Image (spheres, rainbow, N blue to C red):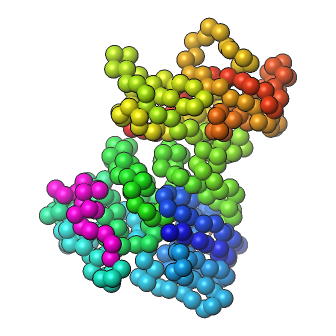
Amino acid sequence: MTLSIAVRRRLGNFALDVSFEAGDGITVLFGRSGSGKTTLVNLIAGLARPDHGRIAIGDHVLVDTERGIFLPPPARRIGYVFQEGRLFPHLSVRSNLLYGRWLTPRAARWGRLEDVVELLAIGSLLGRRPRDLSGGEKQRVAIGRALLASPQCLLMDEPLAALDRERKAEILPFIERLRDEMKLPIVYVSHAVEEVARLADTVVLIDGGRVAAIGPVGQVFAHLDGAGDWDVGAVLTARIVEQDEAGGVTRLDHPAGRLTVQKITGQIGDAVRVRIRDRDVTLAIGEPGRLSVRNRLAGTIVALDEKPGHDVAVRLDLAGAPMIARVTREAADELGLRSGLPVTALIKAVALDGR
Ligand SMILES: Nc1ncnc2c1ncn2[C@@H]1O[C@H](COP(=O)(O)OP(=O)(O)OP(=O)(O)O)[C@@H](O)[C@H]1O
């Protein structure tokens, strides 16, 4: 299923004018406060009308201003998960879960209670009231309720923002399962970089009411990292190849080389995402010889972007993955950096996906 959006809406001095498509998996709306994310979510949810435009999921048209179509929220078949769970306090977890199901016409139902309960590991909570749940458990139930309404699309608006670090870590694997196992477009609003790096398939960067960039998370983040005012880092997907219990490290394999990181949980073969910031990358021409830096990736220079001041952002291709290294103008000249030159990227620090 594909959610397609092309809308314009003016609010005072602010003008939202965006169009993009979101296929199955997680599409993150990412941008500064005030960039227009909530306005966009409200348009998709049916809480606001565009001045002009069209929104559809597959051939199910939700809004089309030209044809005078505007479906109210319940007719949209969209599941919502907000920052706070918004569960019904007087109903048990089971009744909360089934609530959305009752509202869905029988023929349109696809989710089974047992499957959703299993997916989110909430079987032991079914008899409880929301007040007896932790924040993370509430959010899992809220996700379950949204799924049981058999949505064609899921909207998640900062679903982890109200949770502490531990609760976030507890719920992230479930959102990953949702992403990987459900055939569903998930529109996910967040400005938490670690969360986006870990969850996003596609990132839509919203800036001043417009789509400033769209693409796979690795590409959009590498683009932003080079632009300087975002501290995001490139995102590489690597596989766990060794758990060194004695050394307290995990070894990861990427097509451009090996990475050794502090021990993370996971099985051999699991994919993990790592984030590498431009200032944590040092470049060497050829084999760097004896050095304390363990993490070395082989790549090629794609382009050099001059930055204000004395810096140059060096755009690299590491076996297909984009990454940026930041070096001084002087160093770039001295090393003779130019596009097409093979280099070794020495990585001083790797941020992990928070397992
Ligand atoms: N009713 C309104 N009248 C005038 N301006 C509005 C109105 N509602 C929102 N705006 C403006 O529209 C812009 C986009 O707001 P929006 O809430 O969509 O941003 P956001 O990206 O969701 O921000 P945040 O991350 O802080 O939630 C802001 O500049 C806001 O001040």
Residue located 55% across and 70% down the image: 3
Residue located 53% across and 39% down the image: 237
Q: In the image, is residue 320 above or below residue 102?
A: above
Q: Extreme left residue here?
A: 127
Q: Which quarter of the rendering shows the C terminus?
A: top left
Q: Nearer the viewer, residue 210 or 291?
A: 291
Where is residue 147 drawn, in percent x and y? 35, 67
Where is residue 261 drawn, in percent x and y? 47, 25
Q: Which quadrant of the figure has residue 266?
A: top left
Q: Which quadrant of the figure has residue 122?
A: bottom left
Q: Which quadrant of the figure has residue 209?
A: bottom right
Residue located 46% across and 80% down the image: 76
Where is residue 226 drawn, in percent x and y? 71, 40
Chief SS of the magenta region: helix
Where is residue 12 drawn, in percent x and y? 67, 76
Residue 182 in the figure: left or right of residue 51:
left
Q: Which residues are magenta?
A: 109-124
Q: In the image, is residue 348 above or below residue 170?
A: above
Residue located 61% across and 72% down the image: 5
Q: In the image, is residue 120 above or below residue 37?
A: above
Q: In the image, is residue 180 above or below residue 56?
A: above
Q: Is residue 114 magenta?
A: yes
Q: Is residue 228 visible?
A: no
Q: Is residue 60 visible?
A: yes
Q: Extreme top residue here?
A: 290
Residue 189 in the figure: left or right of residue 133:
right
Q: Ligand 1 lies in which image quarter?
A: bottom right
Q: Is residue 142 magenta?
A: no
Q: Extreme bottom residue here?
A: 68
Q: Nearer the viewer, residue 273 or 88?
A: 273
